[in-house]
């Protein structure tokens, strides 16, 4: 292979990310792009790198990133601090509130015109659920939705100055919430955000920068991620009437829906990649990655590797569950996996319960998301009301 093997911004990638990554996985599974970064496309290589944080460091950002951008003992200490907030028991207690939010949102959606699944359903539910979890005021909804739109456009632009400006806006929102709680003192609401302000690390209080970074990781990334996941799942249901009907008949609270959602996201993974930094010279797939070079773990390609998954487009939730890396793997596996799973399940359950059919809207084709994001930018659907459960 030549010094530059591929371009992650090429026309082929922009036209069909999954097809482009599938082709690269077979043609050049460890590929270098024009920036000098290496991308790993095969499942075995991606998993091996993710499970070797000593060789493939997560300390890739110039900015504080708690805990995602940390390694070793430092990462372990901060994960021990935040994991209780995302433990199964803590997440389970949120289900009634999330279900009420989802039911009310679905009931407000029209049944006589197309609904855009990513923005009208996914983004709004993500903002409401995250705000309810963190204790943020409902009045922030439009501000957060506007920020999500701007953040998506900044990400698509790939301009560091633009993404930095959007990130600063989000940090300002979080800082205002922190300052309000500090002014309230003992009268501050007893919610997750207030509790986080009382945490200590290494015997000292968390700094404002650390609190903001944790809340940024919990919120800024998750809002867009939940919206993207809902878009992918709703699209799959709209084009697979048999699956839709079977899941609608399974009722609420079953493990089957969670397994199906994970498998749908494996097939069409909206979380394209994560970055790493090589700490030593290492050979991967016959290529030598030098210490200090950037490495990209392409989850989308790994999740569609036929050596591991068989036919990548065949839905086999039970068989593929243990190999599915939608939420990553290893010490940096997404700490919010349980929370995201609950949000997605509840949103889809309430959508299925309120409808008799979900169909793609005629005359308005879904639009794919642009790299470096995956999934769909828009998924226009018609929601056919169920008996006694009219939408709108």
Image (cartoon, rainbow, N blue to C red):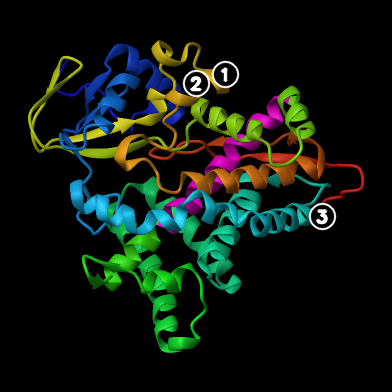
> Which element carries disc 1, helix, strand or loop?
loop
Q: Which residue is mark 3?
A: 392
> Which element carries disc 3, helix, strand or loop?
loop
Label 2 – label 1 distance at C-alpha: 6 Å
- In the image, is 287 to the left or to the right of 188? left
Classify residue 174 by image quadrant.
bottom left
| Residue 304: % across, % down | 44, 20
Quarter of the image for the C terminus: give it: bottom right
Label 1: few (<14), some (14–19) or many (≥20) C-alpha neighbours in 10 Å: some
Q: Which residue is mark 1?
A: 316
Looking at the image, which residue is at 56% across and 21% down? 318
Q: Are marks 2 and 1 in contact (CB under 8 Å)?
A: yes
- In the picture as drawn, the residue positioned furthest to the right comes out as 388
Q: Is residue 132 above or below residue 17?
A: below
Q: Which residue is mark 2?
A: 320
Of residues 252 and 21, which is closer to you in this image? 252
Q: Are marks 1 and 3 in contact (CB under 8 Å)?
A: no
| Residue 224: % across, % down | 49, 50
Q: Is residue 291 above or below residue 181?
A: above
Instruction: Looking at the image, tell me whether mark 2 or mark 3 is earlier in sequence order.
Output: 2
Looking at the image, which residue is at 33% across and 18% down? 24
> Which element carries disc 2, helix, strand or loop?
helix
Looking at the image, which residue is at 23% across and 58% down? 63
Residue 66 appears in the picture as rendered: no
- Residues in magenta? 218-240
Looking at the image, which residue is at 42% across and 56% down? 84
């Amino acid at each position: 292979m030549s010094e530059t093997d591929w371009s992650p911004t090429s026309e082929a990638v922009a036209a069909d990310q999954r097809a482009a990554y599938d082709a690269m996985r077979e043609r050049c599974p460890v590929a270098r792009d024009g920036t000098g970064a290496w991308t790993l496309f095969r499942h075995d290589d991606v998993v091996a790198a993710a499970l070797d944080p000593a060789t493939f460091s997560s300390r890739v950002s110039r900015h504080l990133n708690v805990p995602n951008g940390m390694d070793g003992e430092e990462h372990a200490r901060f994960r021990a601090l935040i994991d209780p907030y995302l433990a199964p028991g803590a997440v389970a207690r949120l289900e009634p509130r999330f279900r009420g939010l989802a039911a009310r949102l679905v009931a407000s959606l029209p049944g006589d015109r197309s609904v855009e699944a990513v923005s009208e359903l996914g983004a709004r539910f993500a903002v409401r659920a995250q705000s309810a979890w963190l204790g943020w005021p409902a009045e922030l909804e439009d501000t957060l939705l506007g920020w999500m739109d701007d953040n998506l456009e900044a990400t698509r632009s790939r301009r560091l100055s633009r993404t930095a400006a959007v990130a600063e806006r989000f940090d300002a929102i979080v800082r205002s919430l922190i300052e309000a709680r500090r002014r309230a003192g003992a009268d501050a609401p007893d919610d997750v955000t207030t509790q986080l302000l009382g945490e200590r690390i290494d015997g000292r209080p968390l700094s404002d920068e650390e609190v903001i970074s944790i809340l940024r990781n919990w919120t800024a990334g998750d809002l867009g991620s939940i919206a993207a996941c809902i878009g992918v799942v709703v699209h799959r249901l709209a084009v697979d009437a048999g699956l839709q009907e079977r899941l609608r008949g399974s009722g609420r609270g079953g493990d089957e829906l969670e397994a199906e959602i994970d498998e749908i996201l494996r097939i069409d993974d909206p979380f394209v990649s994560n970055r790493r930094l090589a700490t030593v010279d290492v050979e991967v797939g016959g290529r030598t990655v030098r210490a200090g070079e950037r490495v990209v773990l392409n989850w989308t390609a790994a999740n569609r590797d036929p050596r591991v998954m068989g036919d990548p487009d065949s839905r086999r939730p039970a068989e593929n569950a243990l190999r599915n890396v939608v939420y990553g793997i290893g010490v940096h596996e997404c700490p919010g996996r349980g929370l995201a799973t609950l949000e997605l399940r509840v949103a889809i359950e309430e959508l299925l319960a309120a409808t008799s059919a979900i169909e793609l809207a005629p005359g308005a084709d879904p639009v794919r998301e642009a790299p470096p994001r995956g999934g769909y930018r828009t998924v226009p659907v018609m929601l056919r009301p169920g008996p006694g459960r009219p939408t709108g």
